[in-house]
Image (spheres, rainbow, N blue to C red):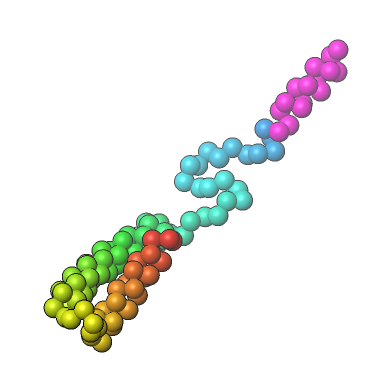
Amino acid sequence: MRTFAVLLLLAISAPAAQFPSNDNPEQPPPGKDVPARLPNGKLQQDAIAKEDYQKNLVDSRDLAKLAEDLKSELEKSDASIVSLSAIKKTEEIEKLAKRIRGRMKH
C-alpha cells in the first residue's frame, strides 16, 4: 500500500515538473512565437493595424468623393451615352474598394 501511495504521488507531481511555471508574464511560454516589437516598445502588429486604419480612412473619403462625382456625372449625362471619365471613375472606385477590403482582411 505504501508503494502505491508513493507511485501515486510521483504520478501526480511528474506532469507538473515537465512544464516549468511562467513566473514572468512579459515572456511568452516556451514554444510560442514572440511578437515583434518596435524600438519604442510597441507591438509591430499594433502599429501596422493603426497605419492600415488611417489609410482606410483616407481611401474611404476618396471613395465617397469618387462615388458622388460619378453620381453627379451620370445624372448630367444622357441615358444612352456613357462618358469615358465615368468608366475611369468606376475603375478607380473598384481599385479603392479592393485596397480597403485587402487591408481589412489582415
Is residue 7 part of the magenta span, yes or no? Answer: yes
Give the residue at the far bottom of this rendering. 84
Q: Where 53 sits versus 1, above or below?
A: below
Residue in view at x 26 percent, y 79 percent? 89
Say which of 96 and 26 sits in front: 96
Q: Quadrant of residue 86?
A: bottom left
Q: Bounds of the magenta span?
A: 1-15
State whether residue 47 appears in this view.
no
Residue 100: % across, % down = 35, 66
Q: Could you say where residue 65 lies in the image, as x and y percent from the top left?
A: 19, 71
Q: Which residue occupies 32% across, 79% down?
A: 91
Q: Is residue 98 magenta?
A: no
Front residue of 82/49: it is 82
Q: Quadrant of the N terminus?
A: top right
x then y, percent, for residue 69: 18, 75
The quarter in which the C terminus is drawn is bottom left
Would you say 86 lies left or right of 72 here? right
- Residue 44 versus residue 68 in the image, above or below: above
Left or right of residue 41, residue 16 in this image:
right
